[in-house]
Amino acid sequence: MKSINKIWSSKLWWLFLLILVVAVNLLASVFHTRLDLTKEKRYTLSNASKQLLRNLNEPVTIDVFVHKKNLPSEVKKLENSIAEFLLNCKEYARNNLQFRFLNPYEGLIDSAQTRMEDSLNYFYGLYPSVLSAPEKVGDELEISKLIHGAVVK
C-alpha cells in the first residue's frame, strides 16, 4: 500500500496514467466491441444476419446513393447511421462486403441529371424526392432533389 501511495505522491503519477491510457487504447483496438443500450436492440445485428454475412461466398458490393450538398442535420444523421451500419456488417463479412457512397448528381448538367434520375428509376426503382429546407438558419428556403437509396450487387 505504501508503494501505491508513493507513486501518487511522486511526480511519476502522470507517467503511470499515460501508460494506463495507452494500454486501454491498445486493448480496445484489439478487442473491438459495441454495446447496444437501446431497449429494442436497434443497433444490434441478429444472429441470422451475422451468420449470413459470415457465410458470403463471393464479394457483395453495395452502392449507396447520397447527396453531398449542404443538407439538414437529420439527413446527415441518417447517412452517418447507414455508414455505421455498413461498417458493422463489414466486420462480420470481412472482405466479402464492399460499399461505396455515390452522389448521382455529381458533375452532371441539368439534362444529364434528368437522364440519371430516369435510369435509376427504371433499373433500380429509385426516384428523386424533393426536400425544401434552408441551408443555414436565416437563409431562404432552398428546394433540392435527393436520390437516397442503395443497390446491392
Image (cartoon, helix red, strand yellow):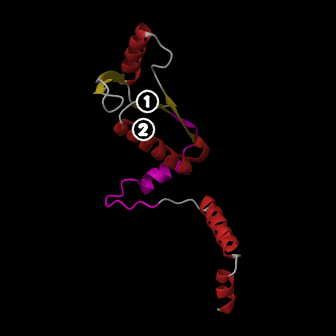
The x and y percentages for residue 63 are 49, 31
What crowding class fits label 2: few (fewer than 14 Cα within 10 Å), some (14-19), or many (20 or more)?
A: some
Provide the secondary structure element on which disc 1 rests: loop
Question: What range is drawn magenta here?
Answer: 35-62
Quarter of the picture holding the N terminus:
bottom right
Q: Is residue 37 visible?
A: yes
> In the picture, residue 32 is in which quadrant?
bottom right
Q: Using the image as rendered, state which of residue 74 and residue 148 is in the foreground.
A: 74
Q: Which residue position is annotated with label 1? A: 66
Q: Is residue 82 above or below residue 11?
A: above
Q: Is residue 61 above or below residue 89?
A: above
The residue sitting at 62% across, 62% down in the picture is 25
Answer yes or no: do the residues labelled 2 and 1 have beta carbons within 8 Å? yes
Q: CA distance from mark 2 to mark 1?
A: 8 Å
The x and y percentages for residue 78 are 38, 40
The residue sitting at 32% across, 33% down in the picture is 137
Q: Main secondary structure of the magenta part?
A: loop
What crowding class fits label 1: few (fewer than 14 Cα within 10 Å), some (14-19), or many (20 or more)?
A: some
The residue sitting at 35% across, 59% down in the picture is 38
Q: Is residue 128 visible?
A: no
Q: Is residue 93 above or below residue 143?
A: below
The x and y percentages for residue 118 are 37, 14
The residue sitting at 44% across, 42% down in the picture is 80
The x and y percentages for residue 99 are 53, 36
Provide the secondary structure element on which disc 2 rests: helix
Q: Is residue 122 magenta?
A: no
Mark carried by residue 79: 2
Residue found at the very far top of the displayed protein:
111
Q: Is residue 57 magenta?
A: yes
- The amino acid type, in three-letter code, at marker 1 is Val
